[in-house]
């Protein structure tokens, strides 16, 4: 283990109090439901995007009991457009487990929080730190960048052994057990703030960093070489033809996607692997001429989707459309829809 830089935690705590983010809607509360919701929403999503969703979601589901009792389709509808929909499904399952297994109260330790759906080690630590003052280390992507640079941790994080070593060092850097409980949440938030606004992937703002005097990467003059991760998942690509089938009264046909795979559990325009396959599905539907709309690319985490929208007015559902229904505009706007499908439908209403 690398030698721990003296005074690291204190510098982070002092800087966060003076310069960190302190007025976000999920801060200044120790309500684990609100903190948990924000932590899940903020995974792989920018704060600016989350702000609007967070408040609207709370209006629909003000507490964990309300979320647990809601139909999954309603939850997905409120999440629609935020992406990474497995988060919403796990959110719903987690709320149900909190109600069924823990009497509607979130567990007070990171160790038990980790047993709930969708809550990993770092998220559990954040909830336990913010809500209960537990000395628990977080290690999300931003924090890995901060700590590997400060420590000069050059081991490859593609290795599980090296990742465990960094976890151990993150725990060693925590404020001492004799500090006030209020320092633990501020330290946790401070690490998040440093990673989000100062210790950036490229062009980090080292001169305003509160731990610059302790930073090995800055002394080396090469902060951007940290963290090290050699194994990169290859990006894939897939082409889909989306049928925007409208009835004569303007309703749109939407199908519920399977429980696994892309856009799992969401409502979607019928999707086909080729235009010929799409044509075959509407061949018996008394269609008007099909119109090809501009194709576009939708970027997922590990895959580029090349989407080809095709519009047509039909008198009957596409062949084999067993899991779908016609939805008027005031109905589909409330459904859980993939972001590109929602954009296509909204464009058709303008």
Image: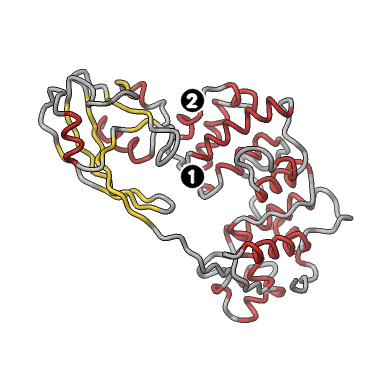
Count neighbours of disc 1 (C-alpha within 10 A) and say few if under 14, some if 14 to 19, many if 20 or more: few
At a point 54% along the width and 25% down the height, the residue shown is 60
Helix, strand or loop at label 1? It is: helix
User: Outermost residue toward the right?
Assistant: 178
**Percent position of residue 176, x then y:** 84, 58
**Percent position of residue 336, x then y:** 42, 31
In three-dimensional space, the C-alpha distance between marks 2 and 1, rounded to whole angstroms, equals 20 Å
Which tag is nearer the camera, tag 2 or tag 1?
2
- Residue 226 vs residue 121: left or right? left
Q: How many marks?
A: 2
At a point 63% along the width and 30% down the height, the residue shown is 95
User: Quarter of the image holding residue 27?
Assistant: top right
**Percent position of residue 94, x then y:** 62, 33
User: Quarter of the image holding residue 118?
Assistant: top right
Q: Is residue 34 above or below residue 24?
A: above
Q: Which mark is residue 96?
A: none
User: Outermost residue toward the top?
Assistant: 249
Can you say which quadrant of the picture contains the C terminus? top left
Q: Is residue 30 above or below residue 180?
A: above
Coloring basis for residues: secondary structure
**Percent position of residue 224, x then y:** 54, 72
Dot 2 and dot 1 residues touching (CB under 8 Å): no
- Residue 42 vs residue 3: left or right? left
The residue that disc 2 covers is 74
Can you say which quadrant of the picture contains the N terminus? bottom right
Q: Which mark is residue 49?
A: 1
User: Quarter of the image holding residue 341?
Assistant: top left
Q: Earlier in the sequence, mark 2 or mark 1?
A: 1
- Residue 71 vs residue 286: left or right? right
């Amino acid at each position: 283990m690398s030698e721990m830089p003296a005074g690291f935690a204190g510098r982070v705590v002092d800087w966060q109090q003076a310069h960190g983010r302190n007025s976000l809607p999920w801060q200044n509360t120790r309500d684990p439901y609100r903190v948990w919701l924000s932590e899940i929403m903020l995974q792989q999503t920018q704060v600016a995007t989350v702000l609007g969703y967070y408040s609207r979601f709370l209006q629909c589901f003000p507490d964990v009991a309300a979320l647990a009792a809601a139909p999954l389709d309603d939850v997905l509808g409120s999440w629609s457009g935020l992406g990474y929909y497995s988060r919403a499904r796990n959110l719903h399952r987690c709320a149900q487990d909190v109600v069924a297994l823990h009497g509607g109260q979130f567990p007070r330790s990171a160790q038990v929080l980790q047993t709930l759906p969708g809550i990993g080690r770092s998220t559990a630590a954040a909830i336990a730190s913010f809500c209960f003052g537990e000395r628990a280390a977080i290690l999300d992507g931003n924090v890995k960048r901060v700590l590997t640079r400060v420590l000069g941790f050059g081991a490859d994080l593609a290795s599980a052994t090296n990742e465990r070593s960094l976890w151990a060092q993150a725990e060693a850097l925590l404020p001492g057990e004799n500090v006030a409980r209020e320092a633990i949440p501020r330290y946790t938030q401070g690490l998040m703030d440093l990673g989000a606004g100062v210790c950036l992937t490229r062009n980090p703002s080292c001169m305003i960093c509160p731990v610059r005097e302790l930073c090995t990467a800055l002394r080396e003059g090469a902060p951007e070489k940290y963290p090290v991760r050699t194994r990169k998942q290859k990006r894939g690509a897939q082409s889909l033809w989306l049928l925007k089938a409208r009835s004569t009264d303007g309703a749109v046909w939407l199908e519920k996607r399977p429980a696994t795979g892309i856009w799992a559990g969401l409502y979607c325009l019928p999707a086909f692997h080729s235009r010929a396959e799409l044509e075959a599905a509407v061949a018996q539907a008394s269609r008007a001429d099909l119109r090809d709309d501009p194709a576009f690319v939708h970027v997922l985490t590990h895959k580029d989707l090349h989407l080809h929208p095709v519009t047509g007015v039909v008198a009957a559902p596409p062949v084999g459309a067993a899991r779908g229904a016609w939805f008027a505009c005031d109905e589909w706007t409330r459904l859980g829809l993939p972001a590109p499908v929602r954009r296509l439908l909204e464009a058709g209403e303008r």
